[in-house]
Structures are given as C-alpha cells and as structure tokens.
Amino acid sequence: MEKVNVPQLFGSLVFNDRVMRARLSADVYASLRKTIDENVRLDEKLAEAVAKEMKEWALENGATHFTHWFQPLTGVTAEKHDSFIEPAGDGSVIMEFSGKELIKGEPDASSFPSGGLRATFEARGYTAWDPTSYAFIKDHTLCIPTAFCSYSGEALDKKTPLLRSMQAINREALRVLKLFGNDDVKQVATSVGPEQEYFLIDEKLYNQRTDLVYTGRTLFGCKPPKGQEMDDHYFGVIKPRVSEYMEDLNKELWKLGILAKTEHNEVAPAQHELAPIYSSTNIATDNNQLTMEIMQKVAKRHGMVCLLHEKPFAGVNGSGKHNNWSIATDTGVNLLSPGETPYENAQFLLFLCAVIQAVDDYQDLLRLSVATAGNDHRLGANEAPPAIISVFLGEELTGILNAIRDDKPYAGIEKVTMKLGVHALPRFSRDTTDRNRTSPFAFTGNKFEFRSLGSSNSIACANIMLNAAVAESLRQYADELEAAGKDRFQEALHNLIKRVITDHQRILFDGNGYGEEWIKEATEVRGLSNLKTTADAMPKLLDPKNMDMLIRNKVFNQAEIQSRCEIMLENYVKTVNIEGLTMVDMVRKDYLPAIEEYLYTLARAVDSMKAVSEKVKCRYEISTIEKLTDLTDNILTSVEALEQALEELKGMEDIFESSAAVRDKLIPSMEKLRGYVDAAEMLTSAKYWPYPSYGKLLFSVK
Ligand code: ADP
Ligand code: MG
C-alpha cells in the first residue's frame, strides 16, 4: 500500500486559512478574516486582491477554470465552469480572474426550480460569494461557494436561508448570554457532524437494473434467502474491495479539507457509514454535499455504484443521515454541555429548554424539513425514527428536569430540592444518554442528534428549521428575562425553566419509538403530530404559526416559503411519477414478456412429455403455469391501474391535489403491482428473469 502523508494531503486543494494567511498581505488577510468572523461587508478592492491570489494559487494547483458553486433547490449542487482565459490581443491568452468575478456570478438560472419566484420578481438570479466557506479545487476547477438569489433578493437556494438561520440563532443566543454576564462572547454558531449512510453495489449489476438507473432504488425484487437477520454486517470486517474504496475516498475528501473520520459497515448487507468530525453548520453542509458527490465518483473508479437513496432495497434497512448538532460560543463554550459550576448549569438548562420547546412547538417543521419521497419509505418503517418527532433526554437529565418541575429533591445529586444557580449537575456520559436508538431527536451528552434525515437529503433544510426554531425559543426567553431586570433575573430564570419543562412535557419520550403503543400514545394521548408522508407534511410549511416564526426570525419571507412548499411538493410528485413510469416500462417491456417466455417453455415441455407418455402428470409444469398465469393476469390489471393513475395525474394543475393523488392512488397502485411481480419472480426460472436479483445486488461486492 502506498504511504499517505495525511497532514500534507489534508486541505491541499482548499484555499483555507493557512493558505490565505501565507499568501495574502497582512491587511488584506485581516479584513478578510473580519468579513468571515464578523460578517462585515467586503469591499471591492479587497475582493480584487483576494481574487488575484486565489487565481495564482488555483493555477499552481492545476486549475484551468473557475465556477460559482451553489446549492439550488434541486437538492444537488450546481456549477457552470468558466475558464480563466482572456485574449491578450496578439492571438495568445492570459489567465484572468477579477474581484467582480469572485464576488458575483450570473448563471443562466431559468432552469432551476424557483416555485414561481422568478416569474413573480425578476427574471434572472445571481450567485454571491460566501467567504465563510473556503474555496476549493475540484476537477481542475476553482470552486467558489456561493449563495444564489433573485435580483430582488429572494433566496433561490439552500445556503442563503441556512446562513440567515445561523444569524438568527447568533442574534438571540447573544442576548441570552449577555443576561448571564457573558460579555466577552462575540459570536455564537451551530455545529454539525452528519453521519452519512450509503450502499455500495457492483456497477455491472447496477447498469442492468433500469429502476436503479432511473430512480436510484429498486422498484421490484423479492427478498433473498438471506438479508440482515443475522446481524452479521454491522461493524463487521470490511471487505477488501470496500476497504480500498474507503481508503481512496478518504484521500479525496482529505484533499478537500473534509474531516472524514469514522467508517464502518452498517446493518444491511452492502451498507456502510462515513462520519466526519463536526464543523460549523455552513461548512458541514457544503462538505456533506461534496462528500456525497465524491462518494459516487470514487465508487465508479472502483467498478461500483454508491447508492445514496433512502430506500434502495425493500426488506432491508434504508439509509439515513444523523445530524449531530450543538451550539457553541466563539470563546469555546458548548452551550449544550453541562458546565462545571451551578451557574453554568443554569445556562445549560436554559439552552436545553430552548431546544425542547423548539422541537415541541415546531415538530411539523422539523418533520417536513426531512420529507422527501425517498425518506417517506424509512420514517416509521421500524428501522428509522418514526414520523412522530419526540425528544430523548436519558434517565439522568429527565430526573433532573422532573425535580426542577416538581420542586422535589433529585436523588442523583443531593438530597435537597434542586435549585438553579446553587446545585451542580453531573456530567452526562454518553453511556447514559446514547442508549435509545429509536428516538428521532436524542440528547447525546453535549449535543442533540436529529436522526430523521434521509441519506440523500441536503442537511441544509433540517438545520434551517432547527436553528430557526431554537432562535425563536431564545428570542422569547431573552424578551422575558430582559423585562424581569437584573434584580429579578434568578427568580425569573427559575420560573421560566420550570414553566418550559412543564409545558413541553409531551415532547419528551425515552421509550421505544418503533413500537405501535408509542404511535397510539403520541397521537391520541399527547397530541403529537404524525405526518406520515411528504404530501401530509409539506403543506404545514404554510401554517400561519410556522410562517410567522420563520418571517419574524428573518429566515424566509412569505414568497420564499410559498415557493419552497411548491417546489418540494413538485419534487415529490415528479419523483414518484418517474418511479411509476419506470415500473410500467419494466413490466410491459421486460417482466411480462419474460414470464410469457417461461410459460411457453413450460407449456411446450408439457406437450412433449405427454407425447412420450399419457401417464406423466407434469405437476410442476402445470401448477406453475396455473399460478403464473394468475399472476400475469393480476400484473396486467395492476399495470393498467397504474397507467390510469399516472394519466389522471397529468391532468392535475393544483400541486396539493396532485401530491395527495400520488399518496392515495399512485403509490398504492405501485405497491400492488410490485407484490404480483415479486411473487412471479419466485416462480420463474432465474434464467428467464430479466433483472439481477436482490441476492445478487446485495452480495455483489466481495
Ligand atoms: P454515533 O454513530 O455513535 O452516533 P459517531 O462517532 O459515528 O457516533 O458520530 C458522532 C458525530 O457527532 C461525529 O460526526 C462527531 O464529530 C459529531 N459531534 C461530536 N461532538 C459534536 C458537537 N459538539 N456538535 C456537533 N457534532 C458533534
Ligand atoms: Mg449517530
């Protein structure tokens, strides 16, 4: 194995702080740092100086092009490459890159989804440099992370609202921290470590599966004799081919300054996970998008395909993304970590309350932030957290909160009534907080883990909602505590914390989130929402309560919210529509003809055998013919019903109507069809079956 110098490799393709400090003049560096750290506007002269050095550095590292790299609402990243060349007038070229080109770009944006925004406001959109995320080189191209807006300032991407949500939480958290006397804190930022799950399958087999190629998931396939029931894959020995892939992947990610750290096999066969070390939410979001892209690219090099779909295979676990989230100050204090002193503990408890309240008040926003057609297959399917959002705190912390709520002693610490600002809290070890894997939103010692995200989701949406909702709790607390004044601060704080714990009790749940009883209790007794599909969840974005909060915290304006709702629902409808069409295609062109061919072979066999002897029974042939012809009848009827559902969808203009039709008609008719085809697979000779089986796909990589 070739030896890698990781520290040297790490970030070698990133225009990071080290490079900036080394290459920029002291004053340019200082102003740029100020822009990055304190959100101070960047002036053009400065941009010119930065652009010049960026270009030199990029050329030295083999770049020929540059691009404004952004995250439109399609969910993937977009880039349009321009070369650095500029005619020199004598037939030759020079390599140029101006401050203007660094700061602003004007991609032809008309084909990106805008949910009517661009029509309403302005025809064009522009991209604007986000200096808080470092530029990097990919495929000989200098990529400049940018935000994407319409000319009238509406966000057309995921980065802009994410940055706004980070500003909101910064603004409100600073107010709260000031009340605790933390005057030295200048900035508060959220951090995220997203754990990414994925499948690796052989490329040759992938190419034979029309459904994987068109939709990223298998639409048919009966269960193989062996799935994940032996629990032998999770944390198992990594196969050589996968291990070579992971090595290669790590190197590529490290070059891009991505802190790839942990890798292991997951529960399902062919399923794996990659976790980076956490970073600022904005950078974590950019890095996760890049990670997903590089994972797929590197897989190709190894003759494999990396599947990021939430549910590539029925019957085995799907893939998610755990969003580990915390809030920290620029002075290095994690606000979700219990402190050393009773005083810090009161502060910790208040931030804890802010999260609890946020999750309760805005359950639906968190749910819809992870809603996609793909993720609907996971949530509530006994493998991923349910569609019901609840918070897990663990025994210790729950005990403490209950003691505060009831003015009772907490046995775990001292046999006295818990008093804020007086009693210390224990340090919560991961062991006591991380046992429940079925909770969608779990406290894990010094951070929360939001586990409902889908593996292919951008983490931006979940973090926008999470940041915004927590900012809203903090805003309310700051208002209340500021009004109480310095003298009554302790008392007001105690009352506030007590009240929040009491009022939001219903969201706290430490039990088994996968159980039927929980669904009953959550919905019938506690009144928590259970939004099972994207069609149910997404319209909640337009609830006045949710719109008000997002607008009040300056995360979205009204038009942006409306357009996003529309785009997400459109995406849902289109995704399932393509799946439906793919099923029709596979059934009509491949499955039915294949079954028919096999039937014909059987029928001919019966004829020939009977010609030999009248006594032969041909029990296998005849019973198979009977069963399979029954199935082909049913397959035909269901494919016709599916075609009908697809046809009806075409005529619908209203997105709420069509998404409901997808949920109520299209998806059920797809499921029905699949059932018959999968049953036929079990009865048909493998020689005739037109697609590689689940067994082959799942155990293809050795
Ligand atoms: P597990 O699989 O047990 O949940 P991992 O170690 O795979 O744990 O992942 C934990 C993730 O949480 C890592 O990405 C890690 O960097 C991240 N993390 C740790 N501390 C924090 C924090 N304070 N804020 C945000 N993320 C964190
Ligand atoms: Mg985890």
Image: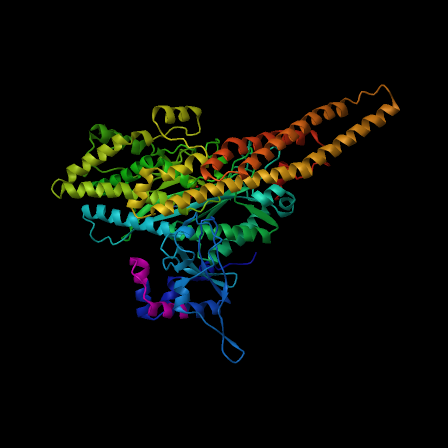
Q: Which residue is the extreme one toward the bottom?
A: 90
> In terms of depth relative to the viewer, which is nearer, 8 or 470?
470
Q: Quadrant of the N terminus?
A: bottom right
599 lies above or below 565: above
Residue 46 in magenta? Answer: yes
- Is residue 5 or residue 131 the one in the foreground? 131
The colour scheme of the drawn protein is rainbow
Q: Is residue 680 above or below residue 217?
A: above
Q: Position of residue 68 (x, y in %)?
A: 44, 60
Residue 485 location in percent, x, y? Answer: 13, 43
Q: Quadrant of residue 526?
A: top left
- Residue at horizontal 20%, vertical 52%? 183
In which quadrant is the C terminus drawn? top right
Specify the segment rendered in magenta. 33-52
Count of numbered badges drawn on the protein: 0
Whether residue 641 sits left or right of residue 289 in the image: it is: right
Taking 177 as reference, is 631 left or right? Answer: right
Q: Quadrant of ligand 1?
A: top left
In front of the other: 605 or 156:
156
Residue furthest to the top: 615
